[in-house]
């Protein structure tokens, strides 16, 4: 009997379920968007029930579309938006507050205080991260401090906390297990990436009781099984991994120096550094790339908060386009951006600037600027931000990067990928299967159950769709990048 892996890809704006066969061919995919909440400027929230219900419904829908029997489901793997935090009642399962999303900047005052108190080096040494509202720890603290009664209930062991992987596994298993994996734990600013434990000193610093946190496990192992009364079938839940680390694995970046960039809601670039954590001199993050066979490997990471979300902004807020593909059609209708540059710092700037007070900017506007030029500048802005990250990685790692593997929804744009190769002066490889986030979770679930036997077997099924060769003149590349950097300067410190 043919068996299949179900990958649950719980993202920032939608939940998806993709079913893969042994050749990593996508059998079917179901997707559902859910509501975003913006209660105050810079605040971003989700309803935790929306996350769970949307993910459960697309999983059931995908199984129905593929006409699978229970016996044909080998395993379920979970990959998730990272840093987003949920706290819930241990008995009832009801959340005590909305999920605070990774994009949310409400805890800037908490991280500012940590920086002023001189805790930056301590946090960086232990976690590989820098104090920033992006990470989960300060979001947990905010809920504990601001929702009446929750802190006392947490100290009494009545509350559970977790990132989205933890929430989904707890719910899908019928409240059986409270677990996370090394990659998600490493994004909380509470986990020591060297001792591989929750760090008591950091927990005390933020006044977070350890009893609310999940048990930390490998990214690939059988944690539990799905509850048949909830899911309609019983099968192992056999992988959990943060979405960007999942894409790194899904791109078969198994060797130190391998680099991938995912073009999703945000843009995230990771470089595999092997078993040795590399400390960045350019404010990149040191993070855990994977926990596999009771060993961890590390990565350098640069995070762009607004990538594909910029295209959605053109559609939903400005009404310049009707569908995401319209941005490519309009951008291709003009030879260049006519001097227009967009810095999409809607929720601050990530690596290498780490400015929580930066805000979005459009510069270079003239009467000749059209919506086509704005669309072209949108695609270029995404590529410029990726270049910012890659330049830092080159210096930190000492590696000359000859190629970049790309994935995510926005990488289907040939125009943007060509500009990416041009501005990087580096080959860009796009795989046949651009859904590498889901693929990584599928691979890891399959490894845990023996569906795939090894990384070597996985490498054989990774195939290239297109290679983009750099063709931009060196002087033009330098000029364009200098203009970008000038535009970034004008966006910084706007809310101070």
Image: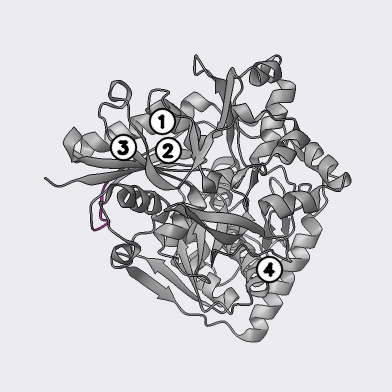
Tell me residue 205's x, y (percent): 77, 36
Q: Earlier in the sequence, mark 1 or mark 3?
A: 1
Mark 1 Cα shell of 10 Å, populated few (<14), some (14-19), many (≥20): many
Tell me residue 348's x, y (percent): 72, 48
Distance between the alpha carbons at the discs numbered 4 and 2:
37 Å
Distance between the alpha carbons at the discs numbered 1 and 3:
20 Å
Determine which residue is flagged by label 3.
236
Residue 407 colored magenta? no
Query: Are discs 1 and 3 less than 8 Å apart at CB?
Result: no
Comparing labels 4 and 1, the label whose residue is closer to the camera: 1
Q: Earlier in the sequence, mark 4 or mark 2?
A: 2
Q: Earlier in the sequence, mark 3 or mark 2?
A: 2
Tell me residue 403's x, y (percent): 49, 75
Distance between the alpha carbons at the discs numbered 1 and 2:
6 Å
| Residue 15: assigned label | 2
> Residue at horizontal 86%, vertical 48%?
118
Determine which residue is flagged by label 1.
54
At mark 4, the secondary structure is: loop
Left or right, 158 with reference to 250: right
Comparing labels 4 and 2, the label whose residue is closer to the camera: 2
> Residue at horizontal 67%, vertical 58%?
342
> Residue at horizontal 82%, vertical 42%?
114
**Quarter of the image containing the C terminus?**
top right
Q: Earlier in the sequence, mark 3 or mark 4?
A: 3
Left or right, 479 with reference to 264: right
Query: Are discs 3 and 4 less than 8 Å apart at CB?
Result: no
* Stretch of the chain drawn in magenta: 23-28
| Residue 339: assigned label | 4
Distance between the alpha carbons at the discs numbered 3 and 2:
20 Å
Query: Are discs 1 and 2 less than 8 Å apart at CB?
Result: yes
């Amino acid at each position: 009997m043919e068996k299949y892996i179900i990958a649950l890809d719980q993202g920032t704006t939608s939940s998806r379920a993709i079913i893969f066969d042994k050749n990593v061919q996508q059998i079917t995919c179901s997707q559902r968007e859910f509501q975003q909440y913006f209660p105050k400027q810079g605040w971003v929230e989700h309803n935790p029930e929306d996350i769970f219900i949307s993910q459960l419904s697309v999983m059931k829908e995908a199984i129905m579309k593929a006409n699978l029997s229970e016996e044909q489901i080998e395993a379920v793997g979970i990959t998730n938006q990272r840093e987003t935090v949920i706290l819930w009642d241990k008995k009832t399962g009801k959340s005590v507050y909305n999920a605070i999303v990774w994009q949310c900047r409400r805890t800037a005052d908490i991280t500012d205080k940590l920086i002023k108190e001189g805790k930056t080096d301590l946090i960086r040494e232990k976690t590989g991260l820098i104090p920033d509202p992006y990470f989960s720890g300060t979001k947990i603290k905010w809920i504990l401090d601001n929702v009446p009664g929750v802190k006392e209930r947490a100290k009494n062991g009545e509350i559970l906390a977790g990132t989205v992987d933890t929430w989904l596994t707890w719910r899908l298993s019928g409240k059986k297990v409270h677990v996370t994996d090394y990659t998600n734990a490493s994004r909380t600013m509470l986990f020591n990436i060297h001792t591989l434990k929750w760090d008591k000193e950091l927990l005390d610093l933020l006044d977070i009781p350890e009893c609310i946190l999940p048990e930390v496990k490998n990214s690939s192992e059988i944690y539990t099984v799905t509850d048949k009364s909830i899911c309609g079938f019983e099968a192992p839940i056999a992988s959990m991994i943060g979405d960007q680390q999942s894409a790194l694995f899904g791109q078969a970046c198994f060797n130190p120096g391998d680099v991938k960039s995912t073009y999703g809601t945000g843009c995230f670039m990771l470089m595999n550094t092997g078993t040795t954590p590399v400390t960045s001199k350019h404010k990149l993050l040191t993070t855990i790339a994977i926990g596999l066979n009771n060993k961890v490997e590390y990565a350098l990471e640069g995070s762009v908060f607004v990538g594909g979300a910029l295209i959605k902004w053109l559609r939903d807020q400005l009404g310049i386009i009707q569908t995401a593909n319209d941005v490519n059609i309009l951008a291709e209708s003009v030879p260049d951006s006519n001097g227009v540059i967009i810095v999409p710092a809607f929720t601050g700037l990530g690596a290498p600037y780490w400015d929580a007070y930066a805000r979005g900017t459009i510069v270079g506007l003239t009467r000749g600027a059209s919506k086509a030029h704005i669309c072209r500048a949108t695609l270029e802005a995404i590529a410029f931000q990726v270049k910012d990250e890659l330049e830092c990685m080159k210096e930190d790692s000492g590696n000359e990067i000859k190629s970049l593997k790309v994935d995510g929804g926005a990488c289907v744009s040939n125009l943007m990928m060509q500009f990416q190769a041009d501005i990087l002066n580096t080959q860009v490889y796009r795989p046949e299967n651009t859904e590498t986030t889901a693929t990584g979770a599928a691979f890891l679930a399959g490894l845990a159950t023996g569906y795939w036997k090894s990384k070597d077997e996985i490498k054989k099924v990774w195939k290239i769709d297109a290679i983009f060769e750099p063709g931009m003149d060196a002087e033009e590349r330098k000029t364009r990048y200098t203009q970008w950097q000038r535009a970034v300067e004008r966006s910084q410190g706007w809310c101070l």
